[in-house]
Each structure stands twice: as C-alpha cells, then as structure tokens.
Image: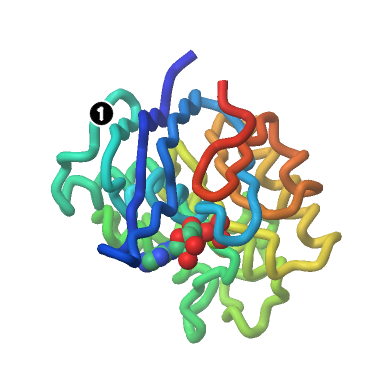
C-alpha cells in the first residue's frame, strides 16, 4: 500500500487570546493510494479546514503533513502551488465556474498554469468533458446548464490535469437527490480507475458510497481512522 496523505498530530488554531479556537485538534490520518474516503461531520466540525490542509490551500498550526512521503510544512508558496496543480483536483459545493466562459474554456483553465499550449488545452478539456458525459456541451456557458451539468464541468476541470487525488467539499450539497447520486456514481467510477478520492459531506447516505468513512466532531476524528 502506498501512503499518499499522512497527517500526524495536526492542529489548526484560529484567533488569539480569548478568541483562541482549535478548528482541528490532534488529527492523525493516513490515506493510501486508491482509497475512496468520505469525511463526515456536522457543520462546524472542521471538515473544510481539514480539506484545505490536505489540499495544500492552508497550513496546520502544528503537526506534520506529508504527501507521497514529502514533508510539505516547509514548502514555500510556489512549491505548494506547483504540487497542488500537479497532484490535486478540487471540486466545491458551489461549482466555482467562470459565468461568461464556455464549458471547454472553464475546464481548460488549470492547464494554463501548467504551461500547456492552446491547442492541447482545448483537446484535453474536450476529452475531460466527454469523460463526465458532457460531449454535447463544449460551448455551453454555465447558465445554459443544469446544476448537475455544472458540477460535471467542475469535475472535468478537476480531472483535466490528471491529478492523483480528487478532493471534493460537499459536491452534492446543491443538487437534488437523484442528480447527487449520479455525481456520486462518477466519483465511484473515477476511484475504480485509480484516483484517490476524498469527499466531504454532512450526509450519511452520501458518505456510505465511499469505502471508508472518517467521522469528525468538534475538530477531532471520532471514528474511522486506522
Ligand atoms: N478563518 C477562520 N477564522 C476563524 N474561525 C474559523 C475560520 N475558518 C473556520 N473557522 C471555524 O472553524 C470551525 C470549523 O470550520 P469548517 O472547517 O468550515 O467546518 P465544516 O466545514 O465542518 O462546516 C468552525 O467553528 C468555524 O467557525
Ligand atoms: Mg465546510
């Protein structure tokens, strides 16, 4: 088993003095290559804080964090940005698409940062859109697409760099039950193709689709670590 994500005694502290608040308390967590994990917990339990740390968007206040055996705490912003761009695909509850931009151009965006030329960007973006079932919607703008289709565009954008890890924060939170299930099927398929999938949710029904459930409460892992 190849260890992808390793957190050891991670804490995240917000505020100072009287306002000191630990959003994460002494989290130790190991995630292997090819796992499909759901992180579940009520609102305010620290799920997004944990995802931002795993995804290199934020740093712990203390503790150790490594990705693929590389200790990232001391990495500077540029190195973190590079690693993030190469290894991680993000998906959010609110899709975060550019509103006046076509599906293809939304999906191609991360490739600009990795220096891919225009022609290759377009062909990779089209491939990713076909992968998520949107082969007919290359030129549609977000407001011409349903919520489920917009989330598929966002998933294609996360896939276009061929990342090792897919990190999704409440990806079905804005979708109806049936559309949410279709999106979960897509994550299941991506996991079967070898992606490590880490999905955050507050809904048990969604979490049950994952192969391991990690439960957070008040910033602590209360269940599911091994
Ligand atoms: N930038 C911040 N400054 C201060 N407190 C924060 C900040 N971000 C999150 N928190 C607090 O940390 C706790 C966990 O937040 P979050 O990780 O967003 O929880 P969840 O995603 O599980 O709803 C909450 O109590 C929240 O108010
Ligand atoms: Mg959250």
Residue 145 placed where, x, y %?
Answer: 68, 77
Q: Mark 1 = which residue?
A: 70
Residue 115 vs residue 215: left or right? left
Residue furthest out toward the front: 18
- Image-based side of 204 in relation to 49, left or right: right
Pinpoint residue 91: horizontal percent, then vertical percent.
53, 57
Residue 87 appears in which quarter of the rendering?
Answer: top left
Query: Picture quarter containing residue 108?
Result: bottom left
Residue 96 shows in the view:
yes
Q: Residues within 10 Å of mark 1 (few under 14, many from 20)?
A: few
- Which residue is found at the position 76% from the left and 39% from the top? 209
| 212 up-or-down from 186: above or below | above
Whole-percent x and y of residue 37? 61, 36
Q: Residue at x 14, y 48 (%)?
A: 76
Q: Can residue 108 be seen from the camera position used here?
A: no
Q: Residue at x 64, y 50 (%)?
A: 41
Q: Residue at x 51, y 83 (%)?
A: 99
**Which sits in the foreground, 127 or 166?**
166
- Colour scheme used in the picture? rainbow
Q: Please tell me how many numbered marks the rendered image carries.
A: 1
Q: Which residue is most to the top?
A: 1
Q: Dividing the image into 4 quarters, which one contains the C terminus?
A: top right
State whether label 1 is within 8 Å of ligand 1: no
Q: Nearer the viewer, residue 43 or 139?
A: 43
Q: Nearer the viewer, residue 91 or 122?
A: 91
Q: Viewer-proximal residue, 12 or 76?
A: 12
Q: Position of residue 40 (x, y in %)?
A: 64, 46
Q: Helix, strand, or loop for circle 1?
A: strand
């Amino acid at each position: 088993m190849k260890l992808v994500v390793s957190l050891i005694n991670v804490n995240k502290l917000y505020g100072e003095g009287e306002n000191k608040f630990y959003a994460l308390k002494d989290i130790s967590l190991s995630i292997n290559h090819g796992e499909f994990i759901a992180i579940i917990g009520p609102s305010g339990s620290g799920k997004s804080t944990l995802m931002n740390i795993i995804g290199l968007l934020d740093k712990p206040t203390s503790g150790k964090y490594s990705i693929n055996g590389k200790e990232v705490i001391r990495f500077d912003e540029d190195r973190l940005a590079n690693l993030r761009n190469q290894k991680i695909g993000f998906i959010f509850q609110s899709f975060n698409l550019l509103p006046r931009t076509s599906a293809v151009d939304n999906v191609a965006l991360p490739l600009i940062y990795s220096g891919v030329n225009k022609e290759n960007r377009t062909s990779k973006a089209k491939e990713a859109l076909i992968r998520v079932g949107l082969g007919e919607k290359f030129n549609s703008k977000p407001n011409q697409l349903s919520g489920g289709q917009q989330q598929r565009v966002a998933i294609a954008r996360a896939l276009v760099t061929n990342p090792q890890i897919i990190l999704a924060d409440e990806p079905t939170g804005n979708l109806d039950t049936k559309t949410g299930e279709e999106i979960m099927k897509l994550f299941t398929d991506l996991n079967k193709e070898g992606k490590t999938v880490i999905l955050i949710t507050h809904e048990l029904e969604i979490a049950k689709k994952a192969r391991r459930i990690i439960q957070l409460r008040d910033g602590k892992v209360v269940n599911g670590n091994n």
